[in-house]
Image (tube, grey):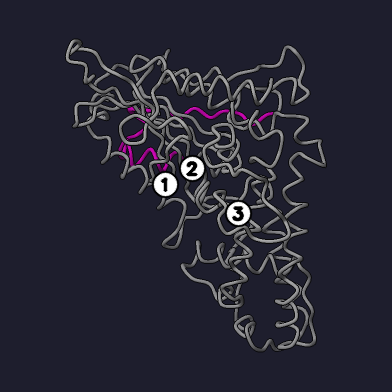
Amino acid sequence: MIMLNMSLGMQALIRILTKMARHAERYPTIRHAERIIKLQDRMKNFGIVFKGDLSFFNEWELFLSDDSQIGQLTTTGPFSGSLGSVATGVRLRTRYQPLLAKAMSRRGKVKYWASDSQRVIDTARYFGTGFFGIGWQNVSNLEVISESPELGGDTLTPGDTCIAYGEDDEEGHGQGARLTEMYRATYLADTRKRLLKQNPEIEFSDEELYTMQEMCGFETMIRGSSHWCDVFTRDEFISFEYARDLLHYYRSGPGTKYGAVMGWLWLNATTNLLLEGPDAGHFFFSFVHDGDIVPMLTALDIINDAEHLPITHIPRTRRWRKSQVSPMGGRIIFELLSCKSDDAQSKQSREQYIRININDGITAIPECNSGPGKSCPLADFAARTKRKGEEAGDFREKCALSEDAADRITFLHQRGI
């Protein structure tokens, strides 16, 4: 969260939730690499000269130079995670420069937070360099929050602490992958036939073809381009896009009954800070996995569709799109706007509103956007958050945790610095 004074006579309280700029999904990062290496080895060892769309593979070399790159922030290429993190810091430093000066004038360092994953920590550090400057350690303190299941609700990564979510095979964490596999079978059959016609000696499974589509993005991030992108048609990539939508929608989004209750933890803590106002502190930045942004947006109920996404076809008018909900380097910013009242009888009074910026786009809160810039009155926003929490249910109960487990986030504060 960032608190700032804007040049238009407003004060703003900003929260940023940032994820790692490299990985495409939270938990299976290592399995991604395993599938890629397995596919490469099979193709290399098959002993044929590939023709057609796969002819490039005869000279192709794996873009992962060694095992140390697996699951880490990318540091090469025009789309690298390190470059994106620094650039984000610089852009926000530029946007909120007046507030930054105020923050620097206060005693103590500014705290900000990252979940305990090396790629997330690295993202936060690169961001700190861009936002606070080269000597970011002198003015800020990055606190690493464990991803241990024992933390209960006092966590940035509720997917690790919600026991029932991990154990529920039908509606929990595994649901997204299961339904995605069912959907991808509807469009990869034609792809397999095309590649089999070009190379009759080898037939690829749905998982292998899906891995090839993933490699288009992974290699592009590291090298800047990828021949794998030319293997598939535009329609096949549109279907791949929807497969990614389904994966996250049913894994940790509106498609799982655990999404809202996990995301409400952070949303509630943020709302409480917004209610405290400028006295709470100037900045509150939280860096997490994309799999932790998705539940928060689910709890916020801001991009949800009226009906669950089907696995038989692509609904073209859907709102939930992974590329817009939590893209690489995705972030959510909550702004508390304190504006002068139009009431002539109370010239000194100010009214407060919440405005939400999702990936550089102001997004109106459904049925709560009557304020300036599509913002929502603070009191209404707080009441809405409370209502969404009641609808989501109790975190400990829904996640099958003990009664003495933490039921809320306590570490998001600037006190004691």
Tell me, for residue 68, which label it has, or none.
3
Label 2 – label 3 distance at C-alpha: 14 Å
**Residue 27: x %, y % from top left:** 67, 45
Residue drawn at the location 57% of the way across and 52% of the way down:
318
Do labels 1 and 2 touch, CB within 8 Å? yes
Residue placed most toward the observer, 74 or 183: 183
**Three-letter code for the amino acid on which mark 2 is drawn:** Asp
Do labels 3 and 1 touch, CB within 8 Å? no
Depicted 108 relative to depicted 177: above or below: above
Classed neighbour count for the residue bearing mark 3: other residues with Cα under 10 Å, few (<14), some (14–19), many (≥20): few
Q: Is residue 187 left or right of residue 417?
A: right
Counting residues from the N terminus, which is met first, the one under dot 2 or under dot 3?
3
Marks counted in the figure total 3
Do labels 2 and 3 touch, CB within 8 Å? no
Q: Which residues are magenta?
A: 122-148
Residue annotated with mark 2: 122
Query: Quarter of the image containing the C terminus?
Result: top left
Label 3 – label 1 distance at C-alpha: 20 Å
Residue annotated with mark 1: 85
Q: Is residue 193 left or right of residue 324?
A: right
**Residue 372: x %, y % from top left:** 30, 32
Label 1 – label 2 distance at C-alpha: 9 Å
Counting residues from the N terminus, which is met first, the one under dot 1 or under dot 2?
1
Q: Secondary structure at mark 3?
A: helix
